[in-house]
Amino acid sequence: MIVISTLDYELQKQASCVTEVYASRLAGLPEPKEDCDAARLLPSLPPGVTFPDSSASAVILDPKTGQVLAMVGETIQGVETPLVSAHSPGSSLDAFVYLTGFTRGLSPASLTWDIPSDESIQNFDGEYHGAMRLRIALANDYQAPAAKLKTQMGIENVTKIASSFGLDVNTDATMLELAGAYGVFGVQGVYFGQYVNDEFTPATVLRVEGADRGIPLDWSLPQAQTVVTPAMAYLMTHVLSDEPARWDTWGRQNALEIGKPAGVKPGQTFDGKDAWVVGYTPHLSVAVWTGARGENDLVTPRFPAVLWNALMQTASANQPADDWSAPQGVTPMTVCDPSGMLPTRECPNLVTEIFLNGSEPTQADMLFREFAINRETGLLATVFTPPELIDNRVFMLIPEEARAWALSAGVPIPPTTYDAIQAPPVDPFANITSPQLFADVSGSVLIMGTAAGDDFMYYRVQVGKGLNPQEWIQLGSDHFTPVEGGLLAEWDTTGLSGLYAVQLIVVRNDQAVDTAVIQVTVK
């Protein structure tokens, strides 16, 4: 019998060679004598870092057919073996946690908080990063937001989503499974492959020919399964191919950038023994794994990233730098970062995000707010604070569960206490005599006082909510007749409650303005 594999012979040789060179360097051993073009694309490993008890493996497949183009068994100390084992996927499966959120109304713009929680999940970099969009959390492989989202979505829902891609979140994964699953995102949500023992998987055999010239097996034409909609696949690809989004962790011009659009998901385990990089273009899907079993070995995705880079550049050398076009059902919008809500005047940073139709934000940002601060005391200004001491500052509103983190990280928190209230001296020609300062009022309130004096032009009375109102409501119209110790205005407080300021403004012919203000509580 003649068995014809799906392997690309030249690509297979290059993949084997570059993996052997990489594994030798990783183990601190002399490189194999055999040279190959792909090995010249390997960036250098960090100096002085070696893992004698380490191994690596790789797979390259065509996501449009589900056919394996190259597969390198576990290469131990620079020597390839036939082993193609399953290993702990670690955070390489986190994309399917976020995908579960996207299927339930969240978007890459949705706000999450990377802060300590009761679950005590630590990020791989040992730090927490505060408020961010889900896009940034996924792109940088931050574990605290991923764990929080998994809890919110329910592990049973995440398991169901992952299983539709041929993955089991409760067991180890193979390179073939990961490359096949992520390749789905690159071809608009369709999984191409073949049924093998009732399981849908990428294929390594193209055709089998018998001695009688019969063909008992022909997988030249792939089978297809639609896993997610093109819009949903594009949503995930838009995040995983966003190079600037992962610069916080990887820096600029890193090993995950190949000079053409590519979606990439690094992954690692908390014990530092397994690290992955899985990435795809519209034409290829490449998964690489590195394991280190030494007692003190801690391997991160930065190691297999250099192998992934060399393999992807080699395999895609003669392919166009195609990007993904937005399908129907996806809408770009400008939103406030990091809340993902509609922009406001206070929002410090605007970004363009994408949304599934119907999930676009409809509310204005509520994460940032401007406060009037007494620059000398650092406290909230009141209507009694001298205007020359007031600065308007924009603060992020920190939720209670994030305050401890914000204080430790030096994130500015708006003050919650007000300036000590000291009523200004009484002006004989502009004053309010009733109600009294801090009086309780209700119903119809008569505002009594004086609005008179030389060069009087007119006066008005206005009210505003709070110790330092952001907007004022005028009671009646402007009054052009002076009042001395009489009724200035009448205020109907029906339906109101809480602290209010009442302000009298007297305007004179020379445009000079005198004011008087009191604070009352409406009950």
Image (tube, rainbow, N blue to C red):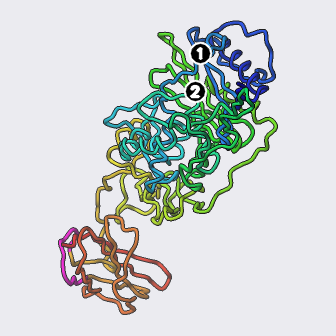
Of discs 2 and 1, which sits in the foreground? 1
Tag 2: Cα neighbours inside 10 Å, few (<14), some, or many (≥20)?
many
Q: Residue at x 67, y 7 (%)?
A: 29
Using the image, tell me which numbered label, if any, was put on residue 222. none
Q: Position of residue 360 (x, y in %)?
A: 51, 62
Q: Position of residue 71 (x, y in %)?
A: 66, 25
- Magenta segment, which residues? 436-448
Using the image, tell me which numbered label, if any, was put on residue 55. 1
Q: Position of residue 251 (x, y in %)?
A: 63, 34
Q: Could you say which is closer to the camera, residue 188 or residue 142?
A: 188
- Rendered position, 80 above or below 305: above
Looking at the rendered image, the quarter that the C terminus falls into is: bottom left
Residue found at the very far bottom of the displayed protein: 481
Q: Could you say which is closer to the camera, residue 491 or residue 478?
A: 491
> Could you tell whether 280 is left or right of 53 in the image?
right
> Could you tell whether 325 is left or right of 277 in the image?
right
Number of labels in the image equals 2
60 is within the stretch colored magenta: no
Chain-order first, disc 2 or disc 1:
1
Looking at the rendered image, the quarter that the N terminus falls into is: top right
Q: Residue at x 60, y 52 (%)?
A: 234
Amino acid at pointer 1: Ser
Q: Residue at x 50, y 56 (%)?
A: 340
Query: Circle 2 sits in a helix, a strand or a loop, which is it?
Result: loop
Say whether marks 2 and 1 touch (CB < 8 Å): no
Provide the residue designation for mark 2.
301
Q: Position of residue 92 (x, y in %)?
A: 52, 33
- Rendered position, 421 above or below 443: above
Q: CA distance from mark 2 to mark 1?
A: 14 Å
